[in-house]
Image (cartoon, rainbow, N blue to C red):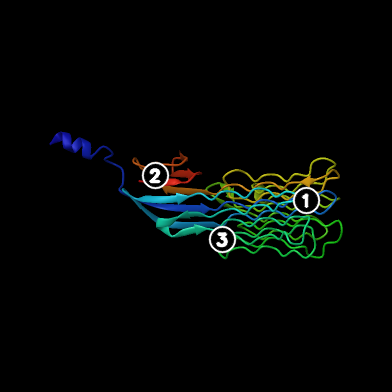
Amino acid sequence: MSRFRYLHSAWPDAPTVYTAEVLVVAGGGGGGGSLANQYGGGGGGAGGLVYSSGITISIGTSWSVVIGSFGSGGTHAANAGSGSNSTISQLSITAVGGGRGGRGSSTTSQPTNGGSGGGVGGFPTQTAGTGTSGQGNNGGANGADVAPFRGAGGGGAGSAGSNANGASGNGGAGLSYFGSYYAGGGGGGSGTTASAGTGGSGVGGAGATTSTTNGTGSNAVASTGSGGGGAAPVSSNPGSSGGSGSSGVVVIRYPGSAIPTAAYTGTMTTTNDGTYTTHTLTTSGTFSA
């Protein structure tokens, strides 16, 4: 009988029900590319961001988690990629992947809609990508920009991307949760002169500034679901590439010590600051308590 009591009470002080906050961020879109001596590429849109509180985790809970992949940066000849969705099916949560930035060299290479929309490339007549309500914001448009035409910023979870209007557009702001920023938009690439747009909240990729040899946009900060920076034109052929967005992430936080039986079949980092336990999931898998 005493042996049974010992096994049954291996964690005698551990609760059986936990109340958690859950953050789900989709993959960010890639920044648009640029043809030599042409126009700047648009910044990629951030992945959609969904925050929930009051989520119950009981011992025996099991969640199927999909972490959205990032969109690759575009080239002078190919469109950038959009980010993909992040999901937790048991909670009916779907964060929508970020839209790609517009290519600077073609009117047919439009930015796309997403969690946050991609910014337009410098080529006239492109239309900014739109964001998903409650998850993100629109990408930036051309505004009243004149030659040299610059790229606009991708939308972020906290604000829309800036229009390209006398300057390259900055990426839309991300949002801060648990001490870190997520889902910033990518900055627009410069035209043949002027500076590039900044990435949103320091996690979106910065746009590139024109150069004789290298106009590649910056990649977004890893595992933040942010957009990549737009490319800038170079004087040497064939052109330059936009930066890649970054993969999504799921963050689970609850008060107290870690659930003794918590496990994940993907990549999970667990921290405790003395008040909260935080699980950060960066690849797809099954979370169990």
Q: Identify the residue at horizontal 62%, vertical 58% (top origin).
A: 158
Residue 133 in the image, given as x and y percentages of width and height: 57, 65
Mark 2: amino acid: Gly
Direction from residue 121 to residue 137 in the image, left or right: left
Residue located beneath label 2 in the image? 256
How packed mark 2 is, by other alpha carbons closer than 10 Å (few <14, some 14-19, many 20 or more), is some
Q: CA distance from mark 1 to mark 2?
A: 50 Å
Mark 1–mark 2 CB contact (< 8 Å)? no
Mark 3: amino acid: Gln
In front of the other: 123 or 90: 123
Residue located beneath label 1 in the image? 34
* Badge 3 element: loop
Direction from residue 249 to residue 166 in the image, left or right: right
User: Marks 3 and 2: which is nearer the front?
Assistant: 3
Query: The N terminus appears in which quarter of the rendering?
Result: top left
Give the total number of marks visible in the rendering.
Answer: 3
* Badge 2 element: loop
Tag 2 or tag 3, which sits nearer the N-term?
3
Residue located beneath label 3 in the image? 135
Mark 1–mark 3 CB contact (< 8 Å)? no
User: Marks 1 and 2: which is nearer the front?
Assistant: 1
